[in-house]
Amino acid sequence: MKNILEEQNLEKNLRLLIVQRELYSKSKRFKILALIILFISIVISVFSIIPIEFSRDYPEYYFGYISTFFLVISLGIGKVSKSIQEKAAEVQQQFDCSLFNLDYQPLVDSEEILKISDEAISKDRGIKEQVRNWYTDAISKFNFPYSALACQQQNIGWNISLSKRYLNFLLFLLFLLIIIIVGIGFVWNGIKPLFLNGFGNFYNFLVFFAAIIKTPVSSAWSTRNEIKEKEEFMNEKREIFSDISANSIECIPYILKEIQSNIFRFRKNHKPIPDFFYKFYKYREEARSRQRLE
């Protein structure tokens, strides 16, 4: 009888978990860099309305051009971050499919897995222990393949509440940002329409608007859609997850395959939550995930 709790701690599987963690972390670092550069783009776009002495020596559209440059750089780095995240999702998919007896053609070769994991282990000797027991012992009451279905339930639902908290945080930041920018515009621009004092300022407005739409508006909208998709999927599979052991043993392989493909899709398109936010609520959300299986 296949035992997921034991197999997940085999050397090859621990290395897969180390690699996916390293790749997700790398993706987040690029994402943070993209956000910093995007913030610079936003700041530069509002220079034309702020009465700073040096800014008066240049036409307004100069700031728009420079801001556009940083915006394009930010978008490019964001694409790199997304590519690395998809690669991490591929590695995690390989890990899951190995445990769940699902067919999967690895896209990340074993040499790269060894190289990345060796580098990570050399930097942090305790990293193996950090990824050990990836799936909690809450699934121990299920025999395989029902235990695989229990793991999938954890994978889909464990961070929905966390994403909702993060969405509220993003909406608050967006509201605060709008208040600050509009306030600066009215106070320092003589109660005139923001960015609308000539072509240069109008161009800056377009750049500013594009940057704001990119984030946090884009992040908030994507997080909202992600939450909605996961909740709809969980509701669609409510009958399957409500009593895992009641599912027909003959149907389980097909159920596992369908659900795993959706988990893979969610992971590739997931909007990363900042580490400080994730760590603050991590154990609370994992406890809720365990309770759903108990």
Image: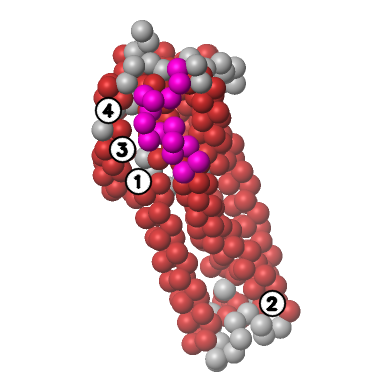
The one nearer the camera, 282 or 88, is 282
Residue 255's spot in the image, x, y percent? 51, 26
- Determine whether 260 is above or below 161 in the image: above
Q: Is residue 223 magenta?
A: no
Q: Which of marks 1 and 3 precedes in the sequence?
A: 1
Number of other residues with Cα within 10 Å of mark 4, as a class: few under 14, some 14 to 19, many 20 or more: some
Is residue 128 among the parts visible in the rendering? no
Q: Is residue 248 magenta?
A: yes
- Image quadrant where residue 168 sits: bottom left
Total numbered labels placed on residues in the image: 4
Q: Which residue is mark 4?
A: 138
Q: CA distance from mark 3 to mark 2?
A: 53 Å
Q: Which residue is mark 1?
A: 278
Residue 132's spot in the image, x, y percent? 30, 22
Number of other residues with Cα within 10 Å of mark 2, as a class: few under 14, some 14 to 19, many 20 or more: some
Q: Nearer the viewer, mark 2 or mark 1?
A: 1
Q: CA distance from mark 4 to mark 3?
A: 9 Å
Query: Mark 4 belongs to which amino acid?
Result: Ala
Q: Nearer the viewer, mark 3 or mark 1?
A: 3
The one nearer the camera, 60 or 12, is 12
Query: Mark 1 belongs to which amino acid?
Result: Tyr
- Determine whether 19 is above or below 196 in the image: above
Q: Which residue is mark 2?
A: 202
Query: Mark 2 belongs to which amino acid?
Result: Phe
